[in-house]
Amino acid sequence: MNFINIIKINLFVILFGVYSCSSSGLVETRINESIGKVRANTNQINLITYNIQDVFGKSEDKLDALIKYFNEEDYDFVLLQELFNEGTREYVLSEIDTGKYRYIIPRIDYESFPEFLFNDAGLFYMSRFPTIDLSHIKFENGIENRGNVIHKLLKKEISLSTDFLANKSVAGSLFQINDSTKLLLCSTHVQAIGSKHQKGYQLRQIRKFIEQAVFKLLKSNTIESAENLGVILVGDFNSEAYNDEKLEMFLT
């Protein structure tokens, strides 16, 4: 499976690039290192992740420029974090090219209380590939199943920053890439300011989330074999990839 091999080979590169960004950084992952709208082959996917930092709404000019970029560039997946503001969310949904991004998960969690604590970390998916319904699978360990996406809140701790008021979370959605290949695409946003112990705990929660998701997908025969599944994790990890100690924590 060429696609699966590409995913496995580039998984470390994807993670390294994502959590080397600042909270507002724009990070692109182009498997096989294609540039712009050029694809090396049909086994390649293009993905972008961005922390939109939208607590009280974005300026119209910035939002229009961002939407224009997503519409014009050749991305298969767009994943956003901190898309908290409902007005901004509705504007994105009204202006994005839905002929291109036909499968959209605009919000992960509508049920947590209270709403003003931004319960799902503002996670947002757009995709050219269809999602696969997971509603028939029972997940455990606090994983909520929304049908086309699964979701888990991450344990927080009180910190000096008001960042801890916004809940942190990890989400995963299964996409059908071709007749035989599926992709579990996970997105997260972890706490910015907190102890090393807390950061490590959140990372372990994310790992367990992915491990259980893969286990349940296999056990339920939603995927026929691990050889037919790719797994990618992206998001805002609020960490410096060029710090050897922090990098080691992520890799273990």
Image: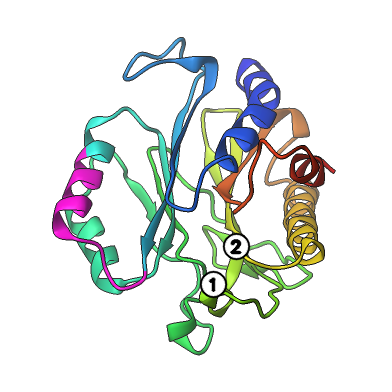
Residue topped by disc 1: 163
Q: In this view, does 198 lie above or below 172?
A: below
- Across and down, in percent, residue 137 comes to 69, 61
Span highlighted in magenta in the image: 55-68
Q: Residue 68 carries which label?
A: none
Type of amino acid at the residue the image marks with label 1: Asp
Residue at 19% over, 61% down = 59
Type of amino acid at the residue the image marks with label 2: Ala
Residue extending farthest to the top is 40
At numbered mark 1, what does the secondary structure look like: helix, strand or loop? helix
Question: Which of disc 2 and disc 1 is earlier in sequence?
Answer: 1
- 14 displayed left or right of 74: right
Whether residue 60 is in magenta: the answer is yes
Residue topped by disc 2: 192
Residue at 22% over, 32% down = 72
Observer-nearest residue: 236 or 229? 236
At numbered mark 2, what does the secondary structure look like: helix, strand or loop? loop
